């Protein structure tokens, strides 16, 4: 199997998977249950979603370990089981997709603000992120993805921690949930300035708000002139609360057509985040094929 770096270097857009949590909810996950709990309690459903994304055309799947930091797990039923959870999440993804599809180890923020705004300190962050990265590597992932980060300090600490634990390729993806800024006011230009010297395998954005906002984020990333590959996984639009529940407005067809256009704006890796189903990824694959 070609490595992540080889697949990016061939100049063809690499298609990643879609959402985890919102699809699990459609599969019957009860309110209040963290998606990571299914790694140990319902592994057959975790495997099923991975396989459905591959059948839709995904060439890369993310492990169900976004909330798998030992800090984030402290107050829940998986407290003290971070290494077990992350290792098993990687193993399930590999079992689901085999050797021809890339498995990316998902690492999300700890859920705490960094000092002085919150309790998260540098040393605690290093311990937590290195434990998670090490377990994912042991489970057999091909690369690691820091996703949905919003604070620069925490992201840089996570990069440092991952690099201390493994030499796997590393992607850093930020959530610009304020349009073209993260919750902490971070811009795509600032992300590039801070990460360019680090030699990351890719940098980008996931989650956020509308596809229009993601287009603007991508444009700002591209305008920096950075040669670092760009990773883009938007939501299926801004969620709307209805009598039937939370609805994401972008249909598979509208999502596929719009996100496929991001390839021409510089994105090298495309996929989906909240609200994006295997049908959205299949539509994106079809739209990329006809470009």
Image: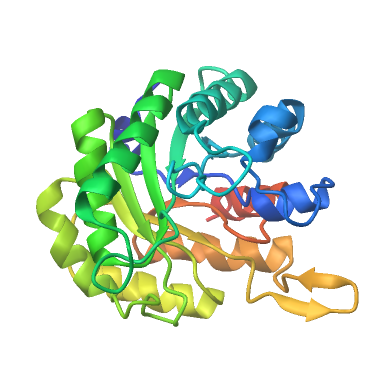
- Relative side of 77 to 90, left or right: right
Q: Nearer the viewer, residue 180 or 84?
A: 84
Outermost residue, left direction? 197
Q: Nearer the viewer, residue 239 or 151?
A: 151
Q: Where is residue 175 in the image (x, y as percent from the top left)?
A: 43, 67
Q: Where is residue 6 in the image (x, y as percent from the top left)?
A: 30, 31
Q: For residue 176, what is the image quadrant?
A: bottom left
Please report the residue visible at 32 percent of the width from the left and 46 percent of the height from the top: 171
Image: 236 above or below 27 = below
Image: 218 above or below 120 = below
Q: For residue 54, what is the image quadrant?
A: top right
Q: Position of residue 247 (x, y in %)?
A: 77, 71
Please report the residue visible at 75 percent of the width from the left and 26 percent of the height from the top: 44
- Relative side of 119 to 141, left or right: left
Image quadrant in which the N terminus is located: top left
Q: Can residue 223 be seen in this view?
A: no
Please report the residue visible at 71 percent of the width from the left and 47 percent of the height from the top: 278
Q: Can residue 189 be seen in this view?
A: yes
Image: 244 above or below 271 = below
Q: Nearer the viewer, residue 110 or 251?
A: 110
Outermost residue, right direction? 243
């Amino acid at each position: 199997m070609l490595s992540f770096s080889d697949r990016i270097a061939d100049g063809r857009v690499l298609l990643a998977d879609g959402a985890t949590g919102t699809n699990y909810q459609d599969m019957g996950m009860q309110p209040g249950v963290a998606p990571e709990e299914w790694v140990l309690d319902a592994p057959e459903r975790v495997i099923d979603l991975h396989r459905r994304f591959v059948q839709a055309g995904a060439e890369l799947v993310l492990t169900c370990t976004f909330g798998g930091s030992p800090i984030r797990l402290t107050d829940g039923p998986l407290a003290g089981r971070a290494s077990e959870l992350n290792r098993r999440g990687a193993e399930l993804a590999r079992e689901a997709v085999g050797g021809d599809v890339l498995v990316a180890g998902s690492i999300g923020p700890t859920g705490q603000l960094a000092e002085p705004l919150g309790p998260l300190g540098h040393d605690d962050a290093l311990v937590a992120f290195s434990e998670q990265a090490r377990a994912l590597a042991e489970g057999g992932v091909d690369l690691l993805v820091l996703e949905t980060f919003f604070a620069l300090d925490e992201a840089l600490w996570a990069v440092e921690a991952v690099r201390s634990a493994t030499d796997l390729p590393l992607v850093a993806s930020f959530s610009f949930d304020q349009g073209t800024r993260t919750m902490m006011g971070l811009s795509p230009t600032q992300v590039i300035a801070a990460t360019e010297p680090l030699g990351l395998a890719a940098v980008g954005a996931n989650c956020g708000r509308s596809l229009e906002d993601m287009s603007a984020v991508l444009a700002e990333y591209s305008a920096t002139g950075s040669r670092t590959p760009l990773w883009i996984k938007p939501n299926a639009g801004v969620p709307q609360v209805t009598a039937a529940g939370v609805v994401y407005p972008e249909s598979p067809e509208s999502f596929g057509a719009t996100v496929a256009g991001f390839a021409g704006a510089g994105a090298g890796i495309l996929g989906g985040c909240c609200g994006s189903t295997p049908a959205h990824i299949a539509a994106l694959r079809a739209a990329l094929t006809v470009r």
